[in-house]
Amino acid sequence: MNTFNIALFGIIGASLLYYIYLIQYTNSVPFQLGEIQEKEQEARNKESGKKNYQIPNFFFITPWNKDGYKLTVKYAQKIDMVSPAWFNVRYNNVIDGRQVVNEQWMQEIVQANPQIAIIPRVQIELQQSSIIQQINSPQLLESIINLVQQYQDKFHGIMIDTPYLSYIDALDAYDIVIFLQKLKARLNNKMLVLTLYGIYDPSQYKHSTLKKLFKLADYTLIQTYDYQIQDQEDQILSPYSWIQENLEHFMTYKEKLLFGIPFYGFKKTEHNKTHFIGNELLKLNASNHLTEWDRSSSECRYKNELVSISYPCPDFLVQRLELIKDFRRGYFVWEGGQGIELFYQLL
């Protein structure tokens, strides 16, 4: 089957599954804010259960949102890989973050699911003016390897996060590939996970660059959230059509790719726009907020005369999981502590 036929099959399949979803799930999955709040209380009294979607997944958690620790332990049986955002490599190539490593959580989550992989995020701070000099510094490589060796029996790999990886072609920063090749060789059997921004333009990445990066990575995360093509007034998180475009674009690559699902949202008032998380959703007065479904992006809005909130709802989540599953890919979540337990029950 040629590439065109595969792509066509994927598009038709995704469309069919979407309509099946509308028929089967619209009435059974809660949508109104009040229903979501009621179902959340029920979810908190339930056991985790097994995965509903038999596809790979990867969850970020953060030390500044401690609900992620609790939720990932409770739902560990549904999680394949978890990535605590603990470490930052400063401009001097010194790694900061060891002081927030949560040893107790690591012990608890492995007890809950002995098969789970702990793959912490290492965020590398690079300056465009000196990116090549920094990336070629032997100290950078040694700092990361020393970190992995320090937690040899607890870490199953590392996730490298730097925005410059997504601009590698624009900056001609191919030394990053050489650095990653050296890093992968030193990791031995440990996993390497990379991340790239979702595409807005088919020419955003060179095919040759993607092949090199995908070959190095055990998994690559495609960030299909933080949607950027919008006006200042918009609150779009992750439009359904954009995720589908990314899934179709990357169909020709056989490597393990995971596509992003946000567990956060935005709250917009007359004066500002701030991040919004699940705990805040549960505190809203449902009788004072109108629930809307944005058909253009397949996203939820909660509104009154003073505020407009964009935050994932069960419909949002199920649609995207079905789409990703249809393309035989996996998903990742940013980030676990910002969601609600009802989301985890649906996974």
Image (spheres, helix red, strand yellow):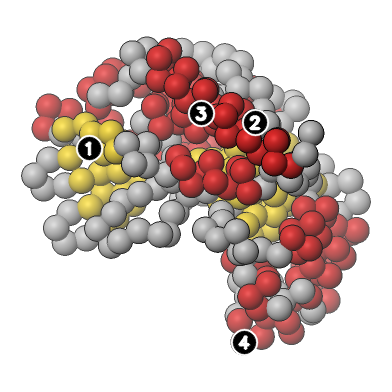
Mark pair 3, 4: CA separation: 46 Å
Is 176 or 44 nearer to us in this picture? 176
Q: Residue at x 35, y 45 (%)?
A: 265
Identify the secondary structure beneath mark 1: strand
Position of residue 68 measured from the top left corner of the image (x, y, whole percent): 50, 38
Earlier residue among tags 4 and 1: 4
Task: Give the CA separation, mark 1 to mark 2.
Answer: 35 Å
Image point (43%, 35%), residue name = 339
Residue behind mark 4:
129
Q: Secondary structure at mark 4?
A: helix
Q: Which residue is mark 2?
A: 9
Amino acid type, callout 2: Phe
CA separation in Å, label 1 and label 3: 27 Å
Which quadrant would residue 279 be assigned to in this image?
Answer: top left
Distance in Å between CA atoms under marks 4 and 1? 43 Å
Vertical arrangement, residue 174 with respect to residue 66, above or below: below
Report helix, strand or loop for mark 2. helix
Above or below, 299 relative to 115: below
Q: Amino acid under label 1? A: Tyr
* Distance (Cα) linking label 3 and label 2: 10 Å
Residue tagged 3:
15
Residue for badge 1: 302
What is the three-letter code of the residue carrying label 4?
Answer: Ser
Q: Are marks 1 and 2 in contact (CB under 8 Å)?
A: no
Residue shown at 63%/35% (left/top)? Answer: 8
Q: Residues within 10 Å of mark 4 (few under 14, many from 20)?
A: few
Closest to the observer: 53 or 324?
A: 324
C-beta proximity under 8 Å, tags 3 and 4: no
Q: Earlier along the polypeptide chain: callout 3 or callout 4?
A: 3
Q: Nearer the viewer's eye, disc 1 or disc 2?
A: 2
